[in-house]
Image: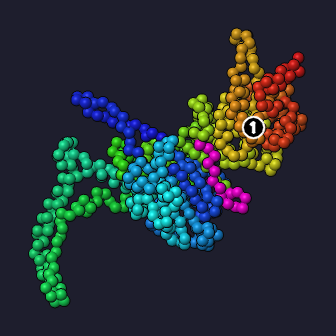
Amino acid sequence: MAKKPTAIAQPVATGAASAVLPVAPVPRPRLHKLRISNFRSIGSTPVEIELDDIVVLVGPNNAGKSSILRAYQVAMEHGSAEGKLTIDDFPNGKVDPLCLPTIELETVVFDKTAPGDKWIRTDTQSNEMFVRERWTWAEPGAPKKVGWDVAANDWHASEGPWGAANVAQAYRPKPHRVTAFHNPTDQAAQIVGVLKEALTAKVKAAKAKPAGGATGGTATEYEKLLESIKALQKSIASEATSAVDEMRTDLGKIIGEVFPGYAVTFDARPEDDIDKTISLFKADPLLRMGPSNGHQTTLDRQGSGACRTLLWAALRILADRTDGKSATASDRPNLLLMDEPELCLHPDAIRQACSVLYDLPKTNNWQVMITTHSPVFIDFSRDNTSIVRVERVMGGAVQGTTIYRPKRAKLDDDDKAELKLLNLCDPYVAEFFFGGRTIVVEGDTEYTAFKHVISNDAGKYKGIHIVRARSKACVSSLCKVLNQFDKGYAVLHDSDHEKIIGKKSKKERNNSAWTENGKILAATEEGRKAGKVRLVASVPNLEEGFFGEASDGEKPYSALIKLRKSDAAFEAIASLLDALIDPAKPVPTGAIEWSDLNSLAAAVKAFDDAQV
């Protein structure tokens, strides 16, 4: 379901004072789904991407992530050189009539009359309207575009919605492509182009601005400028009359000799399309950057990180140029397509860049699709983000799987708060999105112990991700996120005790940590029944269950010392790790695989009885 546009407060005059009333921005088209097949490394099995405000493409190198970004750009610019494929864009570098490059696009629209009823599919639940298009390349060069005929329930043989390409473009987001390594000249051209768009928008606003703050029928400042130029051109044309007449007479004589009876007139057209003759800004602005009190140089002398950051800044300016107040339905929405935004940036700049990119769609005029190898660029506490893992499967085919969408994860407010705090504490927690077997552990002690075991045999444990929740309350939240994966995972947490003695009251009371056991059980239920999730608890915690004593203070450090000094302790923790990785292996003494609270309570009681 589409998000409701954020209301923007605008002042409305009410006598001597002014009131602030909410004004909803004009709803604009947005991308809903992208489907690609037989394009570059993507084979005949289509890669389908569901688009949100933010889409993050993750996966190994050379898995086809950049090809997905390029596919949308190609479809949108099919009328230009950028939209023409070469033979290298075809599978295996040759044209196969059975495997032609194909790109399908589904767009959410709000103007039903523009494409026409035959192209509109209305969703009965969300009441949103969708238009579906397909581009196919039968040979290198330009594609053939057709639309999905809703009435016929099939692709139309020759037509598509909106007609001509230049008309259709206004109904789809405009692509802004930033590749991993643009040369400085290209980057400068991109930035200047974006800033010129912002200036053009300001010129449009100036055309409607009354001169001297006047209102009503008073001429605008821009209209007064046009009248002045018109008068100047008339004066110049009048003064040049004699010269014009001489040229007209001479031309008429020559033409009359060839075409008897013909004459020539010369109209300077001093009053036609005057606004098109005006350039209020230099055609090619020059950008310089450097210390405010030092030497500033052109972009071709700047580092790649500085150039890419400046491009984000320019895009942000463009996105914020109207803040919804002067936006109209004719304003074309935008889509930022960016490869690896973390490249060439200092860690602090990476965090700032992440914030900028995530905030870009707040203007209701942008969507963002990026590729990344950095977990820092994944914030799964956001409501508007989809994570898509792109990887090669058997046979080398590229597969794109939407592995996380906030709505499907069904996170409540507590989950979002926990995940947000976890993101702040550990920006690399999202590393599990990038593939491999994931093990969620409750805290630092388990994380440190397992990392020590892995460091002693890195080859055996390659591709294993240990994710520390840092609190028991966050374990169930992480499980809800991981449930979006097709692949399984394992969970290790402390069982704790159902009742504890209060430190001040010295009275027995319910343990809040035990309540979390029930939440973890519920979050993993479907995965356990499907055989994809293994749920294990240390009884009552890792230190007592495996090292024979509770540890206060520096628990991770104490655990590490025990593992280094005791072969038995090391083997016990290694066995526990192996059991979490491979469900076929038994869980060692000190922990229990559990599926109901009664069995967990019985295991805790047995431990307590053994201590007496």
**Residue 302 in view, yes or no:** no
Quadrant for the C terminus, please: top right
Percent of width and height locating residue 95:
60, 72
Q: Residues within 10 Å of mark 1 (few under 14, many from 20)?
A: some
Is 518 rendered above or below residue 33?
above
| Front-most of residues 37 and 436 | 37
The location of residue 371, given as percent across then percent down, is 58, 52
Q: Residue at x 85, y 23 (%)?
A: 607
* Residue 403 part of the magenta segment: yes
**Depth order, front residue of 172/20:** 172
Let me know if residue 351 is in the magenta part. Answer: no
Residue 558 in percent (x, y) is at: 79, 30
The residue to which callout 1 is attached is: 528
Picture residue at 25% right of the left edge, 30% below the top = 14
Q: Secondary structure at mark 1?
A: helix
Q: Position of residue 57 (x, y in %)?
A: 60, 51
Residue 256, quarter of picture = bottom left
**The residue stretch that appears in magenta:** 392-405
Q: Decide if residue 354 is in sight here.
A: yes
